[in-house]
Image (cartoon, rainbow, N blue to C red):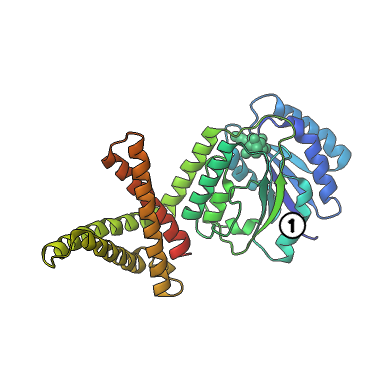
């Protein structure tokens, strides 16, 4: 391959993995392309000194072009952003320094980038040893990414830290990431068209300790919150909520009119009022909230919206029932039910009814 690559590796106290990662990168790329390695280091112990020595000795012996950048105090994402200024090549690879991202994948990922003219190639993790908590947190996080980050719904692992990309997609882009998920920030803000994924097995780290913890997850969610604010996804949720509130007024009004003036038995009136409010919500969302996402047939969208609302009502009643069983006041239980049902309708609206 002709194009050289800048490999950026964020590190924090990863001295024990350094020689192996250098050797494996060299073996994988030496007959493939030129490369430089930038270690974006935020170590807070003696590791940096050790790294500099390894680079000196190792670089001489193995002719590896590597540097360690002082990113003291920077989190993973910001350390990577700093390093982007030091990379001299047009193609960049980001990978962890604990060997969970196999360097042997790099040639294939770079080949895909070039041959298939992609802008980003993501190494998607097949995780085997995640704890239950990490699996749940990761699943919830991914769902929210699909909701808040445009063009992300087709990406299996938007939270991966292993990817290669063309640097030009970041021209005139101001990245303001937080925590570990720099790929999500890039997917939201960069100028790119084609993203391809290549799956790999995410092994346990070889040596050193994990920096992942629940606080990191919390930071990732806050980051997502900033993204949603920035890309106006919030506005959409607000519009959806206003339409939902208008539905309540229509529901109550119809129930009153049908029961009082048309003398229809109130339970039948209620069924008609519910359907009318679903239809009015659908129309308002179609012409306002999701006016730029109207793909396909109007009636198919309406049918899907109806189904999602019916399912949401079942969820609402189920939560009401379960929470009252454990002694929660039925009005509070209903409020919680309404909240979850609204979220459910929103998610299905974004990802299914008005699919982007
Ligand atoms: N520069 C910098 N690098 C960091 C920081 N936190 C973690 N890293 C590095 O980022 C990479 C990913 O961190 P890990 O601790 O392996 O996180 P993880 O892979 O999600 O968690 P494990 O699966 O438990 O290893 C590793 O190379 C870390 O050394 C930081 O604050 N600054
Ligand atoms: Mg790791």
Picture residue at 71% right of the left edge, 35% below the top: 205
- The x and y percentages for residue 204 are 71, 37
Q: Which of the two residues, 33 or 269, is positioned nearer the viewer here? A: 269
Q: Name the residue tied to disc 1.
A: 110
As drawn, 273 above or below 312: below
Residue at image point 72% right, 50% down: 200
Q: Quadrant of residue 154?
A: bottom right
Toward the viewer: 170 or 317?
A: 317
Where is residue 266? Give x, y as percent: 19, 59
Would you place residue 258 above or below residue 5 in this image? below
Residue 70 showing in the rendered view? no
Q: Quadrant of ligand 2?
A: top right
x 51%, y 45%: residue: 140
Give the farthest residue toward the top: 46
**Which image quarter is the N terminus in?**
bottom right
Q: From the viewer's perspective, is 40 left or right of 184?
A: right
Q: Residue furthest front?
A: 265
Q: Secondary structure at mark 1?
A: helix
Left or right, 333 with respect to 232, comes to left
């Amino acid at each position: 391959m002709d194009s050289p690559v800048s490999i950026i590796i964020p590190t924090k106290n990863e001295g024990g993995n350094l020689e192996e990662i250098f050797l494996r990168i060299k073996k994988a790329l030496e007959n493939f392309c030129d490369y430089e390695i930038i270690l974006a280091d935020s170590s807070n112990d003696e590791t940096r000194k050790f790294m500099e020595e390894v680079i000196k000795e190792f670089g001489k012996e193995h002719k590896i072009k590597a540097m360690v950048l002082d990113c003291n105090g920077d989190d993973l994402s910001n350390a990577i952003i700093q390093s982007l200024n030091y990379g001299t090549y047009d193609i960049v690879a980001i990978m962890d320094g604990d060997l969970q991202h196999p360097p042997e994948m790099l040639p294939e990922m770079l080949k895909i980038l070039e041959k298939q003219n992609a802008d980003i190639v993501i190494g998607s993790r097949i995780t085997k040893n995640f704890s239950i908590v990490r699996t749940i947190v990761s699943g919830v996080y991914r769902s929210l990414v699909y909701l808040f980050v445009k063009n992300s719904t087709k990406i299996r692992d938007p939270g991966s830290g292993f990817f290669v990309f063309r640097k030009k997609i970041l021209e005139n882009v101001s990245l303001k990431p937080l925590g570990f998920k720099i790929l999500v920030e890039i997917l939201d803000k960069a100028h790119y068209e084609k993203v391809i994924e290549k799956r790999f097995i995410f092994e346990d780290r070889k040596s050193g300790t994990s920096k992942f913890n629940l606080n990191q997850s919390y930071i990732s969610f806050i980051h997502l919150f900033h993204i949603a604010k920035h890309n106006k996804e919030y506005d959409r949720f607000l519009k959806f909520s206003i339409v939902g509130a208008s539905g309540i007024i229509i529901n109550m009004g119809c129930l009153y009119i049908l029961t009082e003036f048309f003398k229809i038995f109130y339970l039948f009136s209620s069924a008609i009022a519910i359907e009318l409010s679903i239809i009015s919500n659908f129309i308002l969302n179609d012409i306002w909230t999701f006016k730029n996402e109207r793909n396909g047939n109007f009636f198919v969208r309406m049918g899907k919206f109806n189904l999602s609302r019916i399912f949401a009502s079942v969820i609402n009643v189920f939560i009401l029932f379960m929470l009252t069983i454990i002694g929660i006041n039925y009005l509070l239980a209903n409020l919680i039910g309404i909240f979850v049902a609204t979220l459910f309708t929103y998610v299905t609206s974004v990802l299914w009814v008005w699919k982007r």
